[in-house]
Amino acid sequence: METTAKRKFNVREIREDFPALRQLIYGKSLIYFDNGATSQKPQFVLDAINKYYSKDNANIHRGVHLLSQRATTEYEDARKTIAQYINAKTSDEVIFTKGTTDAINLVAFSFGELLTAGDEIVISAMEHHSNIVPWQMLCERKGLTLRVIPINKHGEIIQEEYEKILSKKTKLVAITQISNTLGTINPVKEMIAKAHAVGAKFLVDGAQSIQHMQIDVRDLDCDFFVFSGHKVFGPTGIGVLYGKEALLDKMPPYQGGGDMIQKVTFDRTTYNELPYKFEAGTPHIAGAICLGKAFEYLNQFDLEAIKAYENELLDYAQDLLLTFEDMILVGDSKKKTSVVSFNVEGVHPFDMGTLLDKQGIAVRTGHHCTQPLMDFFKIPGTVRASFAFYNTKEEIDVFIAAVERSINMLK
Ligand SMILES: *Cc1c(COP(=O)(O)O)cnc(C)c1O
């Protein structure tokens, strides 16, 4: 999909690209508002999965035969596409992982090996469990301290508290660029500069930002950037760890096995260079190739137009939701992406989600893998509607009517 001129943003046409959107759920047109959990896949990506397994399937970096060469080229081309998309300095800085969780665990283990007792890791109160638990495990293993930056009632990181927490002891700050539960866009670029000023490294959890905004890892100057393929219109089971080359070079391998070695003897094994040092075993070849295709698909569009459209959806939905009595929006930061978390007083989020499903509307309910954040707001969970660029205002109208019907049934 080589395009120079950007494709004009037309939501009707975009919807045609996503076959999963064309189905009935309990006899009603599917309204898919669970994009924060995972995105639907365009036909372009689905075709690539089919093509890979029907034509090119072979193991990579091994065979002399043509199929293996084709698979290897496509796999490495995908790495280049992704490196360019996020503006990495070289494609050696792009490591394929199983996803965000796997990438964070890789950093926690491997970068963690460079740390010693007394060092500190800093996260925020709005992190996803996958950006909390690996650090807790590391702290336990190495005798480090985990520090948590508090948030305010709007769901924003309190920057003064962040500055107070930072010190010479801080070795790594790991923060989500966009909260999956609240939609808050965190000012990570400024936060990265502050971390670097005390000599700390910075990991950006980009699981929710890669699909909503242009990512430029060199402009951000982050040390690590991680994301999952399935939230950016690609397959499940594949994701990316971006890391600065010099830093990745210093880090020991995470897992041992095939492909990550240079020479193996029973006395001593030497490791392969980047990026292979961190890709032990047969990787998710089809996943990586098709994640590259997802970025080729996205590359057709002007991301600013997508962002503007998604902001319109957000404002439209929030304004309509706020017309309901007893409606509580959870997270009302001035800087938000197209995620609305809400509760209606006297209605359990699970009951609301169940009734919405029966009306063909897919939302997420519960704690969204952010239990400490729920504790902060003193709620068991929320109903979350998260929009992608293939959603429409007409769908939001149907959703609002369904919310009204649900409230009337439940109260
Ligand atoms: C989804 C998500 C994760 C975890 O991603 P996986 O694909 O489950 O590994 C981490 N952080 C944020 C902000 C997320 O939204």
Image (cartoon, grey):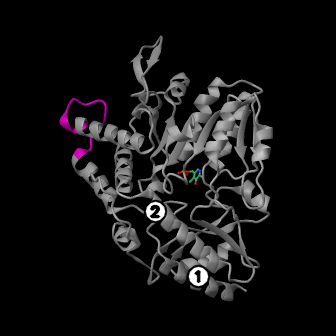
Kind of residue at disc 1? Ile
Q: Residue 20 at x, y = what percent?
A: 39, 69
Residue 400, label in figure: 1
Residue at 43% across, 63% down: 40
Dot 2: what SS?
Answer: helix
Per the image, the residue denoted by label 2 is: 306
Mark 1 surroundings within 10 Å by alpha-carbon count, few (fewer than 14), some (14 through 19), many (20 or more): some
Dot 1: what SS?
Answer: helix
For residue 93, above or below residue 374: above
Mark 2 surroundings within 10 Å by alpha-carbon count, few (fewer than 14), some (14 through 19), many (20 or more): many
Between the residue at mark 2 and the residue at mark 1, the CA separation in whole angstroms equals: 23 Å
Front-most of residues 340 and 48: 340
Disc 2: residue Cβ within 8 A of ligand 1's nearest atom: no
Q: Which residues are magenta?
A: 56-68
Main secondary-structure element of the magenta-colored stretch: loop
Task: Name the residue at the left extreme.
Answer: 66
